[in-house]
Image: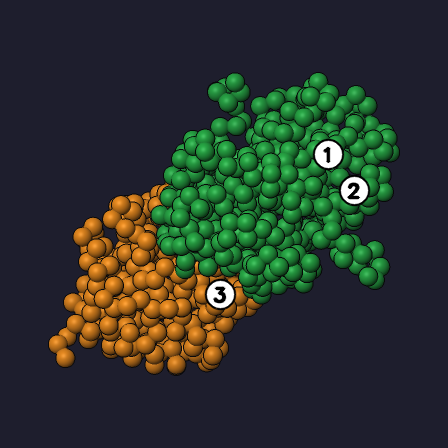
Chain colours: A green, B orange
Amino acid sequence: MNQTMPNSFRHFPDDRGHFGQFGGRYVAETLMPLILDLEREYKAAKADPAFHAEFDDLLEHYVGRPSPLYFAPRLTEELGGAQVWFKRDELNHTGAHKINNCIGQILLAIRMGKKRIIAETGAGQHGVATATVCARFGLPCTIFMGATDVARQAPNVFRMKLLGATVVPVTAGAGTLKDAMNEALRDWVANVHDTFYIIGTAAGPHPYPELVRDFQSVIGREAREQIQKRTGRLPDLLVAAIGGGSNAIGLFHPFLDDTSVKMLGVEAAGYGLDKEHAASLAGGRPGILHGNKTYLLQDEDGQITEGHSISAGLDYPGIGPEHAFLRDIGRVDYTSVTDEEAMDGFQLLCRTEGIIPALEPAHAIAAVKKVAPTMGKDQIIVANLCGRGDKDIFTVADRLGVEL
Amino acid sequence: MTRLASAFSKGRPALVTFITGGDPTPDATPAILDALVAGGADVIELGLPFTDPMADGPAIQAANIRALEAGTKTADIFRIAAEFRARHPETPLVLMGYANPMITRGAEWFAGECVKAGVDGIICVDIPNEEDAEIGPALREAGIAFIRLATPTTDKARLPAVLENSSGFLYYVSVAGITGKQQAAVDTIAQAVAHLKAGTDLPIAVGFGVRTPEQAAAFAAHADGVVVGSALVDLVAQHGANAAEPVRALTQALAEAVHKAREPA
């Protein structure tokens, strides 16, 4: 059992919520008792077979899991190197991996007797997934979304409203994901008694990075089983895009102790690492924001700087603390691709496989495009196709100079 | 006796005032600080601006943005503090803000700068006792008070964790929420302060949502001090570089009300 190996990479965080120097619980005192309650409740839920049974049942019959593991023959041929496989989490209900986590968290909220749900969203995928589970369980829901993102993700805003959510545009700062998270925290601190905050990525105060990872790890558990069943072996490389990093940690975590499996996280290099970007590992340094210690884009005074990415879902100046840890200990490699490269990756997948990806996994595809040709034809890459591109067609059309 | 201890040992409740450093500009802050002293403030909290003030309402969020847009750097805040200390040897000065600007060059660096500038204590919104190691040891080593926040969610089980490593005074955040919004009922303040007093000998200052001399007096009747922030920050927003006089006038009205709050009518 890998889980019990003393040198396992899968034992983190420690009991104080730390992944090495990262993670932790850097929150206002008002929230501390609730954070501690949540930790207790999550521990109890983890040990409760009924909780797992309900989670698994909803994933199977409501979300549509397991998602397929798909061999991409034409992309593989075009790149001329390693075999490229995709974990098809874009086929989930609501069109992205975000729903996995929302199912888990709403079951926790119900366990804790909370009557109201709040969430932040960037691209709107997490907002839609949260609004979806709130409709499914009949709980009122308020979604905080940066005003800039409200403008560039109009279809998702409408979806959330159709699902019965209240969408609050946040005008503070640049009006993106970081500002939405600030506003969600402000709401939470004022409504701790009855409100559950469904955080959308594997970040925030402990136990969020752990529980989001655990709920998303269904991606990697399925992929690990599927690839072995189909090819008789483990993959050589896993690739996933990273904003906060929940789809990536969900794919990576079940493989962390498989030492033959390399992993590549792909950050958003925006206009380029020497210009505006959202690559906090490549261009940031450790700091404290939104309840955890992690790599952050910041100036010399510790003021947080605005990220930029063509993908609203990657446009965040931080990264989940477990990624910060896995990078520092060298278990996972991290790279970045620009907006332009992501656009190429987006079109490449449309053209070769008949799949329109979201701009987030388009970053992973762009990285696959670079790395697959350097690998042997007998080698296997599994990339996470964490969302579908319907929501992004306006952004893409705009970038291509097409009027819809 | 430390400056902070003296401020709470005058035989009457203390007025604690907050403004954001560098708002509207670093050059305007010294005159506003002088106005707080002239008006009778017993303790001054100087906000260290941050891009992401998660626990603050619109007034103090806007003040943070004004200060940063005016180019305020951490070095400006320490220069303002050091100059304040030279002009006002007796008035305690506390830096209040968020963790990241405090730890970004290392907690030891930050604590050392506090000592050099004559800062008496710090309030850090997002370092609960669970993460004390981040900055607490450096502050204690340097002799800088680490003022912690207690809140309406601080129940009997939680209180010891809040009080551990707490020094200077205890800041009771009287509403579960963000700064400058609603106000707690006076009878809940009396109960909360009694609950906190059972656990500590530290002076207890009550804040959040206190805007007028009448409200301040009502809170001061039950506490060792009252904190006023957003109402003063609003005056800075309204009057900009000319805020010193209106800030002095409000501070004086608040100070008179707070100082007399326990005298028989």
Q: Amino acid at mark 1?
A: Phe
The crowd level at tag 3 (other Cα within 10 Å; few <14, some 14-19, many 20+) is many
The residue indicated by pointer 2 is A355
- CA separation, marks 2 and 1? 11 Å
Alpha carbon of mark 2 to alpha carbon of mark 3: how far? Answer: 43 Å
Left or right side of A187 for A251: right
**Residues at discs 2 and 1 in contact (Cβ within 8 Å):** yes
Q: Is residue A26 left or right of residue A366?
A: left
Q: List x then y, in percent, for residue A286.
A: 53, 43
The answer, for residue B11, to whether it is visible in the render is yes
Q: Position of residue A382 (x, y in %)?
A: 71, 30
* Image point (70%, 33%), residue name: A68
Residue B120, position as x, y percentages in the image? 32, 57
Query: Quick one: B173 or B117, which is closer to the camera?
Result: B173
Q: Residue at x 69, y 25 (%)?
A: A227
Question: Mark 2: few, some, or many residues within 10 Å (few <14, many ≥20)?
Answer: some
Tag 1 residue: A86
* Relative side of A264 to A192, left or right: right
Tell which tag, 1 or 3, sits nearer the viewer.
1
Q: Local crowd at mark 1 within 10 Å, few (<14), some, or many (≥20)? A: many
Q: Is residue A281 above or below residue A258?
A: below
Q: Chain of mark 1?
A: A
Q: Is residue B226 above or below residue A331?
A: below
Would you say the residues marked 2 and 3 are in contact, meaning their CB atoms lie under 8 Å apart?
Answer: no
Badge 2 and badge 3 in a common chain: no
Q: Which mark is residue B61?
A: 3
Check disc 3 and give the amino acid type: Gln
- Residue B149 location, x and y as percent? 33, 55
- Depth order, front residue of A334/A237: A237
